């Protein structure tokens, strides 16, 4: 291992920041400037250092990559989904990074029609992300969103499917997602599309209407969401009756709708925004089924007529329950499906179209699991398609008969070399400092002597925005589990795991609960003998990177290694800068530093501001140079300051992907290579051969 004299050292340029009479001197503030040649020079020095100190792990990384790649079915096909007269699906081919989007007309025996080969689209590109992929209702055209930079700024291309030719216009500065297929909707005339653009802070704020073949300069601005604390989204109802807009802020929502058969019609407000009122609606034959929190902390379901949909006309269908969180509602021709969460686990309540009669729940085979609905585009079906998995059960696509509850397994993910009988999955609880019982989902090999206090472990967490990290399957984890690791997910406060209160007690002035919950989970694993006290590693990304960064500064003695992926490390400085993407929309998550009390509270846990001269765990910290959500300079500054202050010889390495954004590499093999680096770092630091 090279001595500390070989480590990169960023120049110090003191930059005072004064708020509420408190002056913080930020020696690495200058790293925010990507145009400063010294910034890239420093990042490159970190990359060179990583190559140097991790060079001896290259054979291990190659072995990890090979075994992770060999587990998956490289040539594979998704379950076809019927839309109109066509069956749409994606397939992958061995050796190719990206999916190929296809369809068949009329039946699955029909000839294949390739709509888009993302591998061809990505030729010559270092990054290629697809968001919305939407055929027109008549099946003659295709609109899709693509991002070639990783900044989640998309372009829309429109293709004539029969000829294979593209229409001349390209729509730019489009809102999409690195994580979901979204961003464009067709009117029912199959020639008009609706899309949303971004403001200078990358906030989705304007809805436009475009007629295919026209000059985009002629596009009509349908709506401008001027409130900078709101995001704007656009969707189409499952029954194809309405184009809708969804106005999202942390505590308040608003929903608008227009006739999908009349693209020039007026957007009507379902219920004007009221501070603190969170609602979302699904249409069903002239009525809206509305999930909302009016006098219902865990949400309930009400019904309203389309003609007069305001909350004064809401009639309760499913009342509030203290132990059940309502997360959403889906409408079908003859059925209503309510998405719920009870005891931290997802469940689906199916009833007749009135939302009341013949109510029953989908049954699941394991004590802890992850399940999500597929897109379920067919309004008239009696089948609910779900994607089910657990920590030890590969993804299974099932059609649940909404009359009988019977499962029809459409596809089971093939994982080569995996025998589920060799593994154990548990759901246990740790006690937080305030007495709260915090769930953990854990998995390990059955032949592991799990409680002798000698095992290594990796614990993952997130704990923000109400996001729930369910115990889903990931075949890559078995490269650790098969080497003796216990793998754990801590279901800490800040998510919706145990209801709305669980979320509210993990944000704003209660944010420290997220960190102390996670620390308590780690201590519990050690106390109960699941893990050796000197072999506990933790991992988190984005706001989960804040989690592990805060825990690392609060309890550096508890952890052997930390993996912080695209981490939010400099909370106060970021939240003071309204020009940064996400900042203004997140005052109700973290607090507004203009408030002295919230400034002091955020400062008390912000990882960057709490580094001091002491010993710290081994750290792998990562960034994408084009990340629009957590700017590269946050992990860069943290790395530089940590190197300056730490008093140990533990390894600190900084991985920079110069071509990606928040989600990492876009190609599936490149993505696995990044995971191989993570795991090689862990195994090396744990001394596991």
Image (cartoon, rainbow, N blue to C red):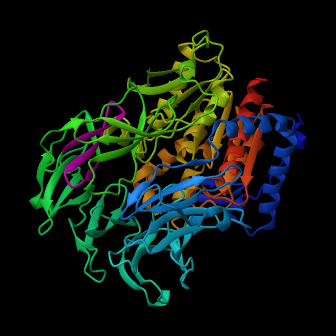
Main secondary structure found in the magenta portion: strand
Q: Which residue is painted at 77% across and 43% down in the image?
A: 644
Residue 574, percent from left and from top: 56, 57
Examine the rendered structure and indicate whether residue 639 appears above or below residue 243.
Answer: above
Q: In the rendered view, would you say 265 is above or below 73?
A: below
Q: Quadrant of the C terminus?
A: top right
Pinpoint residue 151: horizontal percent, then vertical percent. 60, 64
Q: Residue 435: x, y in percent?
A: 38, 23
Residue 21 in view here: no
Q: Nearer the viewer, residue 139 or 566?
A: 139
Q: Is residue 16 above or below residue 464?
A: below
Please report the residue visible at 84 percent of the width from the left and 53 percent of the height from the top: 45
| Residue beneath the point at 47% across and 89% down | 214
Residue placed most toward the observer, 268 or 634: 268
Q: Position of residue 218 (x, y in %)?
A: 44, 90
Closer to us: 337 or 458: 337
Quadrant containing the N terminus is top right
Q: Which residues are magenta?
A: 328-351
Determine if residue 29 is in view. yes
* The image quarter in which residue 675 lies: top right
State left or right for residue 418 relative to residue 304: right
User: Relative to residue 574, is residue 362 depicted above or below?
Assistant: above
Q: Is residue 318 left or right of residue 412?
A: left
The quadrant where residue 155 appears: bottom right
Q: Is residue 184 magenta?
A: no
């Amino acid at each position: 291992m090279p001595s500390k004299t070989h480590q990169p050292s960023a120049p110090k340029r003191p930059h005072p920041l004064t708020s509420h009479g408190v002056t913080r001197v930020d020696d690495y503030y200058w790293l925010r400037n990507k145009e400063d040649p010294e910034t890239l020079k420093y990042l490159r020095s970190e990359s060179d250092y990583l190559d140097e100190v991790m060079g001896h792990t290259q054979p291990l990384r190659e072995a990890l990559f090979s075994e992770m790649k060999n587990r998956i079915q490289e040539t594979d096909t998704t379950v076809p989904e019927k839309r109109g007269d066509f069956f749409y699906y994606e397939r992958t081919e061995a050796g190719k990074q990206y999916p190929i989007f296809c369809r068949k007309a009329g039946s699955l025996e029909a000839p294949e029609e390739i709509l888009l080969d993302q591998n061809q689209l990505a030729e010559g590109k270092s990054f290629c992300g697809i968001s919305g992929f939407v055929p027109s209702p008549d099946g003659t055209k295709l609109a899709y969103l693509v991002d070639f930079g990783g900044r989640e700024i998309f372009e829309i291309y429109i293709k004539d499917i029969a000829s294979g030719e593209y229409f001349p216009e390209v729509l730019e500065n489009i809102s999409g997602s690195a994580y979901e297929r979204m961003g464009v909707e067709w009117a029912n005339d199959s020639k008009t599309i609706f899309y949303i653009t971004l403001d200078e802070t990358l906030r989705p704020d304007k809805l436009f209407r475009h007629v295919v073949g026209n000059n985009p300069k002629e596009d009509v601005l349908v709506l401008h969401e001027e409130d900078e604390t709101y995001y704007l989204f656009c969707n189409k109802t499952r029954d194809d009756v309405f184009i809708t807009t969804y106005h999202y802020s942390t505590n308040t929502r608003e929903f608008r709708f227009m006739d999908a058969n009349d693209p020039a019609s007026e957007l009507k407000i379902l219920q004007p925004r009221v501070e603190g009122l969170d609602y979302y609606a699904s249409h069903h034959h002239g009525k809206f089924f509305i999930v909302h929190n009016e006098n219902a902390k865990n949400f309930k379901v009400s019904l309203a007529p389309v003609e007069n949909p305001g909350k004064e006309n809401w009639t309760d269908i499913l009342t509030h329950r203290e132990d059940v969180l309502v997360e959403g509602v889906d409408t079908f021709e003859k059925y209503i499906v309510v998405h719920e969460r009870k005891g931290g686990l997802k469940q689906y309540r199916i009833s007749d179209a009135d939302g009341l009669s013949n109510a029953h729940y989908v049954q699941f085979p394991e004590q802890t699991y992850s399940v999500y609905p597929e897109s379920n585009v067919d309004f008239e079906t009696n089948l609910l398609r779900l994607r089910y998995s657990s920590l030890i059960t590969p993804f299974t696509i099932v059609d649940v008969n909404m009359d009988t509850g019977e499962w029809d397994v459409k596809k089971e993910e093939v994982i080569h070399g995996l025998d589920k009988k060799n593994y154990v999955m548990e759901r246990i609880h740790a006690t937080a400092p305030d007495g709260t019982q915090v769930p953990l989902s854990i998995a390990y090999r059955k032949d592991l002597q799990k409680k002798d206090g000698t095992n290594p472990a990796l614990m993952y967490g997130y704990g923000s925005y109400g996001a729930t990290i369910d115990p889903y399957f990931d075949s890559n984890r078995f490269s650790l589990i098969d080497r003796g690791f216990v793998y754990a997910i801590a279901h800490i406060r800040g998510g919706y795991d145990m209801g709305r209160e669980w979320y509210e007690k993990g944000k704003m002035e209660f944010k420290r609960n997220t960190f102390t919950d996670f620390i308590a989970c780690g201590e519990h694993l050690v106390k109960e003998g699941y893990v050796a006290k000197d072999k506990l590693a933790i991992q988190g990304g984005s706001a989960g990177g804040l989690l592990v960064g805060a825990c690392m500064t609060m309890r550096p003695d508890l952890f052997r290694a930390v993996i912080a992926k695209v981490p939010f490390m400099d909370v106060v400085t970021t939240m003071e800068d309204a020009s940064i993407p996400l900042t203004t929309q997140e005052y109700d998550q973290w607090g507004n530093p203009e408030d002295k009390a919230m400034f002091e509270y955020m400062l008390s846990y912000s990882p960057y501001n709490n580094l001091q001269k002491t010993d710290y765990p081994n750290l792998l910290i990562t960034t994408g140079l084009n990340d629009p959500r957590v700017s590269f300079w946050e992990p860069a500054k943290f790395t530089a300051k940590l190197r300056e202050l730490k008093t140990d010889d533990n390894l600190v390495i900084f991985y920079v992907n110069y071509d990606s954004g928040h989600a990492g590499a876009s190609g599936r093999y490149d993505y696995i290579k990044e995971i191989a680096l993570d795991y090689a770092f862990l195994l090396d630091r744990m001394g596991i051969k």
